[in-house]
Image (cartoon, helix red, strand yellow):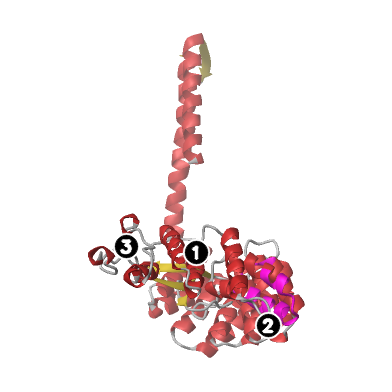
Amino acid sequence: MWMIFFSVFKLFISICLLILAAYYGGHVTFDIAGKIIELHIAAVVFSILVMLYAYGFLKSVLRKISSALSGKPAYEKGVDYLQRAFSGILLKDRKLAAKSIEKAKKYLGDIPLLAWIEGQLMLANNDQHRAKAIFYELSSKEKDTALGAYSICNMAIKERSSSDAINAINSVLKIYPHAYELIFQAIVISLRDGNFIEAEKYLSSIKNTKKGKLVAAIVYSEKGRVLHDADLLKKAFKLAPELSENALHYADCLISDKEYRSARKVLMQAFKCVHLHKLYEKYISCGKNLSNSDILKLAEKIMDEVPNSWLTHFEFANLALKNDMQQLAFQHLLIAYEKEQYNFIADKIEEIVRNIGNTPQNIVNISSLPELINAKPVRFVWKCRHCGSESDVWMPICAHCDWIGEYVYEENCTINSNQNNLISFL
């Protein structure tokens, strides 16, 4: 781009000089071998410009001819073979890769990138020992790169060799201290080995990242759960109240010390983050010798605190049904269904409607019922945001991709218009 701009600029200057020479006029006199030659100044400027452009053109042509006769410089040939070797690895053409590596070595020597490509070729040949030897040698020679250490790390993770993986990760971090994905991987390895001290060493490096607080909370939570340490569970809860399992463990510790009010505060805050049945159930059962009226009051409180959740209204309706309060139960089931059109809520509404004939009072105004035929089947799962794998329970580390803190709670719904047919029943 700059070369084109410079060429256009030179042409523009040349035209301007010719125009100025032609405009101001004048002649130039030359004495050549006793012969007087008089030329217009514009002709002189034009001749000089022609000679300059001719010189540049001839210089370019001579350079190309010289390059063609002498061949490419050694480093250029080496780069060409290096590119071919890399292409051979990508295309899984091991013969092309092997030949190109050997030829590239003649011109470039044992440069880090070439050694790394050779290691990849060994991996493609299933020669793990040779590949590891190449990567270890490369790692010992590297100063500003970490190709060898990173490759050793990947191999160690696949082989489940924790010590080798941690050592390789630490080597990479010396050169690239902000390699956060490797830091998270080191924490995962340490947690799986139960080495909480090693895991905590990395927390200062990730404290300013978006995911840092959550990962730190998981480390403290796992350590607190294993050691039955309420202080660690509390620390984890303050960092990430959305960790429902930690909130449940922390609440259990408070309940064991008969601190029911504090336990309910913890459960309420966690429920506001994630609307889980386990949190709800623990909240309304948190206390000693609770009567039915006490449980209903707790259910009303959590419903008031989280009014937009279908779960609070649905569970309140279930409690009302247990206390034979069908009218109240029916009202809250309708509210729950208004928020989320799940099939099990529709089934509960239908159950009450079917029991109209067995009740002394007509508690249901059938004409005001919502349409329930499009209620959707639903399954609630924990899903990994990284690989998409699903689990029925929350896990700190995904069993499929080894990523930490990636599980989110979500619903899986499919529309099924034949799921419920209350309209035909009525």
Upstream in sequence: badge 3 or badge 1: 1
According to the picture, the residue beneath numbered tag 3 turns out to be: 372
Residue type beneath disc 1: His
| Callout 2 touching callout 3 (CB < 8 Å) | no
Residue type beneath disc 3: Leu
| Callout 3 touching callout 1 (CB < 8 Å) | no
Which residue occupies the extreme left position in the image?
Answer: 424
Q: Is residue 244 magenta?
A: yes
Disc 3 to disc 1, how far (Cα)? 18 Å
According to the picture, the residue beneath numbered tag 1 turns out to be: 313
Residue type beneath disc 2: Arg
Magenta residues, as a range? Answer: 239-264
Disc 1 to disc 2, how far (Cα)? 32 Å
Disc 2 to disc 3, how far (Cα)? 44 Å
Question: x%, y% of residue 367?
Answer: 31, 55
- Please indicate whether residue 106 sits to the left or right of residue 223 in the image: left
